[in-house]
């Protein structure tokens, strides 16, 4: 079953700005899906429409088969939203905020309170549950919004840049947490600017730019499309000039640092054979740039000329 | 969705609870000021000036103004509660907590209006207690008192809601109370019987809806009124209906809420 199905979604804001120009997306139940795109691409607009914070101009949205035009209440009951921007009362306590949200979804008070405690504990902010929310740090506020989105145990959890402004350690623990939620069967849609985040978490990925989907595939197939990967080798012994490692192209950055290009047809084993033959000892090795980032720039670049022509 | 009625009931009660918790939490801003202001009215107009003014509609002045002053506090507070609560929910964006939930618009409206009625009645009760320190209050027709005060609180809660929907900045939530509500209340027969006015101004006064509420309430308490009571009730109900329909229309259009 499809957790989310969007067809030909359009959005023109009141000021005439066209934010979405015909979005199609389908997310299978249980999937972990990433929606990527640069600032202003239309990610939050798309999510806003699904969660009924933004009115669509045209198109269809179905959540677990329910047409949002016909029964938005039933569809909304299945969705949990972690918005991009802080949107809770600064004067209420986390416990009140999460419990009340449970109530708005129809959970009896007792159950809502139990769940609020469970999720606030799981997200590590229980020790602040009784303080006004304005006392929470930025990272804690994000976690509060995750707890709030989970209180009614939605089948589809949508996170709009949940890790923006969150430190690396916390980001990783949030990933772990969200992975756990996904493992329990909850479908997850996540928007992010961090490609490594999408790579670490998601099996499927769609890229949106200027209100259009420009890529919709699995992470694997996306990565497979990279033509070339550049490795940076740290060497034990200094070199004076780039060694001949043909067919691999090399560049000597400094006497101890060598860059090697490995194309998709080649393998890395061969590179090591060549290195051994030459007696070059490698201390460590890493990717030069984030491959996804390159791919991303590449994909966006491809579209730009068309955009300008349009 | 299972048991939709149940879900909606819980959602409504949660919102009402949130609203009541809000105005109780900030009681020094919500409950105390009207108690202080109204005490001053009783002291100045009732205690000090009342004896010189003499009887109004055959009643001591203090007794005559007490119902109007109670009503005035109900009107200002039910309006203020909804306009400030709903506007700050918009401003801080936590209105989105409701917009993403399965709650239908009518229920969101009902929740806020109930909160406004709650504050209006609570302040009305406090001011009544204050009034009892200065004068005896007898209740002529309890049913009318309860009905009129509740309908009035409902009407002004709706007014506050509509104001908040249109409001874009904090200034916008004080314009109507200052330039519309306060004058209408003062000219709505709180402090005088319209019999005292020249014919022309009596007629103008009849265009002021607050006059009907104050008089209907005064009738419930004291048994005297400038206006036939059934006409007053009809007018209040008519306004409530109109404002409810307008609120629902604005919510459906998403004015000020959904872009
Ligand atoms: N209420 C609005 N009125 C007019 N234009 C808007 C409105 N909201 C968003 N936009 C515009 O729509 C476009 C898409 O915005 P959106 O918030 O969906 O982007 P995004 O992909 O979420 O970006 P970011 O990564 O920065 O969050 C932007 O150009 C934005 O300026
Ligand atoms: Mg966004």
Image (cartoon, coloured by chain):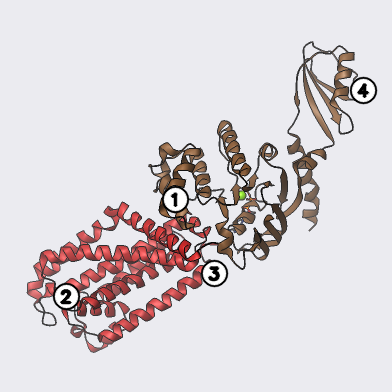
Q: Give the foreground label among 3 and 1.
A: 1
Callout 2 and callout 4 share a chain: no
Asked if badge 2 and badge 1 are on a common chain, one would say no
Q: Which chain carries label 4?
A: A
- Can residue B170 be seen by looking at this rendering? no
Quadrant position of ligand 1 = bottom right
Element at label 2: loop
> Compared with residue A68, is residue B193 higher up or lower down, i.e. above or below?
below
Kind of element beneath mark 4: loop
For this view, does B14 lie left or right of residue B194?
A: right
Foreground tag (2 vs 3):
2
Mark 2 highlights which residue? B139
| Front disc: 2 or 1 | 1
Chain designation of label 2? B
The dot on residue A246 is 4
Same chain for mark 2 and mark 3? The answer is yes
**Chain ID of residue with mark 3:** B
Q: Chain A is drawn in which colour?
A: brown
Q: Depth-wise, is mark 1 or mark 4 nearer the camera?
A: 1
Q: CB of residue at label 1: within 8 Å of ligand 2?
A: no
For disc 4, the neighbor class at 10 Å (few under 14, some 14 to 19, many from 20) is few
Q: In which quadrant is the N terminus of chain B drawn?
A: bottom right
Please identify, in this view, whether the residue under mark 2 or under mark 4 is nearer the observer: 2
The CA distance from mark 4 to mark 3 is 67 Å
Please determine if labels 3 and 1 lie on a single subunit: no
- Label 3's element? helix
Q: Which residue lies under the disc numbered 1?
A: A111
């Amino acid at each position: 079953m499809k957790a989310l199905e969007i067809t030909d979604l359009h959005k023109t804001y009141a000021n005439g700005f066209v934010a979405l120009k015909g979005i199609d997306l389908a997310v299978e139940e249980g999937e972990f899906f990433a929606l990527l795109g640069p600032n202003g691409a239309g990610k939050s607009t798309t999510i806003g429409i699904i969660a009924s914070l933004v009115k669509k101009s045209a198109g269809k949205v179905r959540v677990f088969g329910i047409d949002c035009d016909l029964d938005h209440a039933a569809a909304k009951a299945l969705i949990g939203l972690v918005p991009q921007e802080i949107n809770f009362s600064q004067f209420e306590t986390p416990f009140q905020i999460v419990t009340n949200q449970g109530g708005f979804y129809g959970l009896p008070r007792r159950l809502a309170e139990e769940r609020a405690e469970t999720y606030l504990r799981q997200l590590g902010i229980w020790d602040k549950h009784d303080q006004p929310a304005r006392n929470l740090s930025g990272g804690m506020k994000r976690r509060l919004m995750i707890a709030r989105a989970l209180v009614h145990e939605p089948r589809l959890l949508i996170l709009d840049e949940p890790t923006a402004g969150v430190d690396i350690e916390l980001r990783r623990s949030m990933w772990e947490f969200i992975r756990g939620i996904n493992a329990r069967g909850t479908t997850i849609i996540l928007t992010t600017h961090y490609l490594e985040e999408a790579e670490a978490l998601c099996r499927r990925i769609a890229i949106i730019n200027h209100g259009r989907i420009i890529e919709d595939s699995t992470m694997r197939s996306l990565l497979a499309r990279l033509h070339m990967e550049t490795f940076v080798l740290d060497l034990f012994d200094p070199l004076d000039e780039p060694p001949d490692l043909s067919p691999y192209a090399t560049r000597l950055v400094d006497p101890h640092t060598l860059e090697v290009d490995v194309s998709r047809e080649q393998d890395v084993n061969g590179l090591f054979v060549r290195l051994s033959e030459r007696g070059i000892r490698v201390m460590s090795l890493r990717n030069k740039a984030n491959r996804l980032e390159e791919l991303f720039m590449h994909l966006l670049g491809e579209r730009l000329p068309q955009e300008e022509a349009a | 969705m299972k048991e939709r009625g149940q879900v909606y009931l819980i959602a409504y009660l949660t919102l009402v609870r949130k609203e009541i918790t809000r105005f109780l939490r900030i009681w020094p801003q919500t409950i105390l000021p009207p108690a202080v202001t109204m005490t001053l009215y009783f002291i100045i107009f009732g205690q000090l000036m009342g004896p010189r003014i003499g009887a109004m509609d055959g009643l001591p002045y203090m007794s005559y103004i007490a119902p109007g002053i109670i009503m005035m506090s109900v009107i200002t507070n039910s309006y203020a509660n909804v306009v400030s609560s709903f506007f700050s929910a918009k401003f801080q964006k936590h209105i989105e907590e409701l917009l993403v939930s399965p709650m239908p618009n009518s229920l969101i409206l009902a929740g806020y209006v109930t909160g406004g009625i709650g504050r209006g009645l609570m302040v009305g009760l406090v001011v009544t207690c204050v009034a009892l320190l200065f004068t005896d209050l007898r209740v002529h027709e309890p049913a009318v008192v309860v009905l009129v005060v509740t309908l009035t609180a409902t009407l002004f809660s709706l007014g506050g809601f509509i104001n908040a929907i249109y409001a874009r900045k904090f200034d916008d939530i004080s314009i109507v109370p200052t330039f519309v509500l306060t004058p209408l209340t003062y000219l709505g027969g709180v402090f005088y019987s319209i019999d005292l006015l020249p014919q022309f101004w009596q007629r103008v006064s009849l265009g002021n809806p607050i006059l009907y509420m104050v008089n209907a309430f005064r009738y419930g308490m004291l048994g005297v009124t400038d206006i036939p009571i059934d006409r007053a009730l009809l007018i209040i109900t008519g306004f409530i209906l109109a404002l409810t329909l307008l609120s629902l229309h604005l919510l459906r259009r998403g004015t000020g809420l959904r872009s």
